[in-house]
Image (cartoon, rainbow, N blue to C red):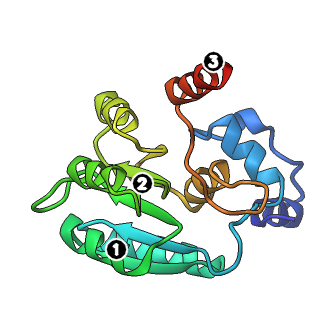
Amino acid sequence: MGILDQIRALLGQSEAKETTLPNVSESVVERRKRARVNAREGTRVLIVDDSKTIVTALRKFLRSAGYETLEALDAESGLEQLREHKPDLIFLDIVLPGMNGFAALRAIRRDPATRDIPVIMMSGNEQAMEQFFGTRIGADDFMKKPFSRYEIFFRIERLLDDNQVPRRAIAAGEQRAAEVAGTH
């Protein structure tokens, strides 16, 4: 029983309908009703964001679920951490001092040692162009800031394989190209 259900029970109110929850998408409501699927214990996540608040929040949420975290406040430090520790997943902000997140993503995708690591881009800007561009150059998902705990784990869960290991999402174009290559 969730906290809201406990409060409703104490107040003697019946369960609220899903449609009465303001600004909550159906997927979030549905996700809250079922058990969360986490990545395997010890999954290593690199967080690259210039906001110490965002880094701290992500660290807290991820570590509470058994993830290991690595943190960097700029892209250059993030790329160093990436080469040194080879994380299983990366949360990468777009707007960073020095090298921006798009340039860092390009560097990640060009390096054979890191190209297969899933990357979730983050931005406080609500421009759809950032999401589109990030996806075109190899982001596996996009998360707008501010975000909730549920949003973080929803994004991770979408990238998990059958063994609870984060894997790259195959873009529709890449999948079609692979299918065509396999048929010839």
Q: Is 56 placed left or right of 26 in the picture?
A: left
Pointers 1 and 3 in contact (CB under 8 A)?
no
SS assignment at label 1:
helix
The crowding category of the residue bearing disc 2, from other C-alpha atoms within 10 Å (few below 14, some 14 to 19, many at least 20), is some
Q: CA distance from mark 1 to mark 2?
A: 11 Å
Q: Nearer the viewer, mark 3 or mark 2?
A: 3
Q: Which mark is residue 112?
A: none
Q: CA distance from mark 3 to mark 2?
A: 26 Å
Position of the N terminus by quadrant = bottom right
- Identity of the amino acid at label 2? Arg
Residue identified by numbered label 2:
115
Which residue shows up at 68% across the image and 67% down it? 39
Q: Is 53 placed left or right of 100 in the picture?
A: right
Residue identified by numbered label 1:
83
Which residue shows up at 23% across the image and 67% down it? 50
Q: Does residue 44 sit above or below 115 in this rendering? A: below
Residue identified by numbered label 3:
184
